[in-house]
Amino acid sequence: MAGNTEPLSPRAKLAVTAGRAAAAVSRAAGRGSGSVIGGRVALKLDPDLLARLARHLDVVLVSATNGKTTTTRLIAEALRAGGPVVSNALGANMPAGITSALAGGSDAKFGVIEVDEKYLAGVARDVTPKAIALLNLSRDQLDRAAETRMLAEHWREGLSGSKALIIANADDPLIVWAASSSANVVWVAAGQEWKDDAWSCPSCGGVMQRPDDDWFCGECGFRRPTPSWALSGDYVLDPHGSAWPIKLQLPGRANKANATTSAAVAAAFGVPPQVALERMYSVQAVAGRYDVVSFMERELRLLLAKNPAGWLETFSLIDPPPTPVIMSVNARGADGTDTSWLWDVDYTRLAGHPLFVLGDRKLDLAVRLEVAGLDFEVCDSLDQAVQMAPPGRIEVIANYTAFQDLRRRVGN
């Protein structure tokens, strides 16, 4: 329970110290932040460490296919109005990374934790969260992650009986199915741009009907619940019908949806919507996402898109033609090695943009763009793509490891 300041056991202290040492060695060797290796070492010495570190915190978990890192950051900023926050802000969202993050939060009141979809149920058992935010589910990392309906079922089973308040997107049938096993759910109308993973009913397998912004199954009666929070244009509507303006430095409709869910979460922790939304304005970028950087005397905006739903949202926020667009795709372990998802993305939305393709799997993307009837240039490096791009700010869209490669190249 939050507020319990019982000191860590000698074993737990040793685990934390060893984890920090391992992380420091990793950083010194230039192998990243060290949060994952540090957490692995700490958990090896004390398998119950995650639960011990969370004992004094009011915890909210955030999970989704897309938007969980940004939403975690927005919630963290909002909750700082009520006290110190510890969060895995850099996106290390599996148990080892979460453990490393919480090890640095001995003085915190709140824990705001992004959780990989596969690990949500297990982390929830360990940290006994006060709230869990569920944003969306769609296809991603096809060689690693479960099919989306299987993942929704796993969440549904894992969250059944949880005492946590579930803040869930009423517009995603898979999220509604996952959350419906819980007794205490706050529904948020956050929208769902990508619908191609939720055309069949997760309850009975029937065909979903989608009139306007509603949805229901005509065979079993499974339907969209009535939301108590909603995104309406540039406003958040709270359960009392009050409209609160959303003013973000982050672009796009998806981030307004993330802010709406974040406001609902903050309210559950006693932070009023007006205060929460005002604090969210301070967020300019999230782990490099949306950063505008100077490189080779050009302005580049860095955008992360890891799967079809993410690319669809990204296309909606880039500057219009003739803005040049650089796209980079890898297929390393952290990305998923299966690139067949490229065929689910509607690249015809990029018509009119000068396009430049790079990354480990640039030829896979090139074939997809050729089939879409688009003109493009295949490049060997970011430097070459920037040199070839016509004047103006350049939009740079990349999947996970390609995004990290680009950040290193531009010194971000």
Image: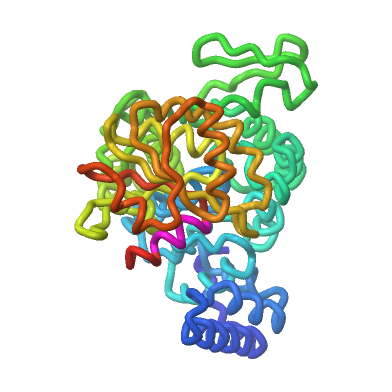
Query: Could you say which is closer to the camera, residue 213 or residue 319?
Result: 319
The stretch in magenta equals 401-407
The answer to whether any part of residue 173 appears in the image is yes
Left or right relative to 275: residue 34: right
Q: Residue furthest right?
A: 204
Location of residue 253 in the rendering, given as x and y in whole percent from the top left corner: 37, 32
Q: Is residue 195 above or below residue 56?
A: above
Q: Which residue is at a point 54% across and 21% down the rendered structure image?
A: 226
Query: Could you say which is closer to the camera, residue 313 or residue 108?
Result: 313
Quadrant of residue 54 within the rendered picture: bottom right
Location of residue 307 in the rendering, given as x and y in whole percent from the top left corner: 56, 41
Q: Which residue is at a point 65% across and 55% down the rendered structure image?
A: 124
Location of residue 59 in the rendering, given as x and y in whole percent from the top left corner: 53, 58
The answer to whether any part of residue 284 appears in the image is no
Residue 405 covered by magenta stretch: yes
Residue 334 covered by magenta stretch: no
**Looking at the magenta stretch, what is its main secondary structure?**
helix
Q: Split into 4 quadrants, where in the image is the C terminus? A: bottom left
Query: Could you say which is closer to the camera, residue 51 or residue 5?
Result: 51
Location of residue 355 in the rendering, given as x and y in whole percent from the top left corner: 39, 39
